[in-house]
Amino acid sequence: MVRNGRQYGRKGKAPVTRSRPGALVTGASSGIGYELSKILAREGHDLALVARSADRLETIAGALRDDFGVQVVVVSVDLSDPGAPDRVFDRLREAEFTVDVLVNNAGFGTMGRFVRSDTGAQVDMVEVNITALTHLTRLYAERMLERGQGRIMNVASTAAFQPGPFMAVYFATKAYVLSFSEALAEELRDTGVTVTALCPGPTVTGFQKRAGMEHSPIGGRMVTADAASVARAGYAGMMKGKRLVIPGLFNRLGTMSPRFFPRALATRIVARMTAVRGEA
């Protein structure tokens, strides 16, 4: 039988080591994280799926087991809780699940003037987008380094390349993710452990609804990519060991704009795209 990601005989003796690599994906219940989970399963990875919704994760886990024959461990936690990364680590250690691929995908944003925003939501955003990502990376990068191999993907955004009025904290968190990932990639150069920052542009996911972006240009007509294509680009780049992946020519060109415009003008342009009605 199979228990905790390992195979046992009828009497539960002599565990057989998992032959497939293991991948941990946060924010796996929808969007880019869900699509990356499917790709990783199809490519032969056992999975540890992390998100808040236990029911949704169990449904996804069942489908991935049936479709790809992989083992799946479900970890339902809220990464805005400072203790959540340690609980994820303890759960996977208990399951004897080795993380060969870490995908820090969980994240969210909110839209509106900072001084009118909910303080708790802004602090939670920093916890999820920055603190949990950093904590999980620290926990697993060390162990990858000891084994001399591993892949880490941190999902940032094209928002990382300039300030974002009306989404000030979100843009700032993604700037951190990009800077942190590129710095860590250099630290780990030639160790067998690679770090990739995936920077998608506006993408069709549940992000826009949660952020309240439906009535802004960046959350409406500018959303051109789909989660599946972003996931494919991210996976391909990660497996090649690329440090930076920006899916789509338009997005790549957009990240260059701060080089050609005065910073204040670039920030004003972003404000026109992120402002909800009545805010600009």
Image (cartoon, rainbow, N blue to C red):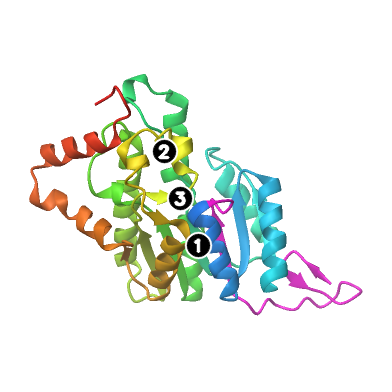
Residue 159, given in percent of the width and then of the height, sits at 30, 46
Identify the mark nearer the N-term, 1 or 2: 1
Residue at the image point whose x is 43% and y is 40% from the top: 208
Residue that carries the numbered disc 2 in the rendered image: 109
* Region of the chain picked out in magenta, as a range: 1-30
267 or 126, which is in the foreground?
Answer: 267
Looking at the image, is mark 1 or mark 3 earlier in the sequence? 1
Amino acid found under the numbered disc labelled 3: Leu
What residue is pinned by disc 3? 133
Are the residues at dot 3 and dot 2 in contact (C-beta closer than 8 Å)?
no
How far apart marks 1 and 3 lie (CA) works out to 10 Å
Mark before the other along the chain sequence, 3 or 2: 2
In the image, 128: left or right of 92? Answer: left
Tell whether label 2 touches label 1 (CB within 8 Å): no
Q: Quadrant of the C terminus?
A: top left
- The quadrant in which the N terminus is found is bottom right
Residue 131 visible, this angle: yes
Residue to which mark 1 is pinned: 102
* Location of residue 278 in the rendering, given as x and y in whole percent from the top left corner: 29, 22
**Mark 1 surroundings: few (<14), some (14-19) or many (≥20) residues within 10 A:** many
Between 264 and 24, the one lying in front of the other is 264
Reply above or below: 215 against 7: above
Q: Is residue 16 in the magenta section?
A: yes
- 68 left or right of 180? right
Query: SS of the residue at dot 3?
Result: helix
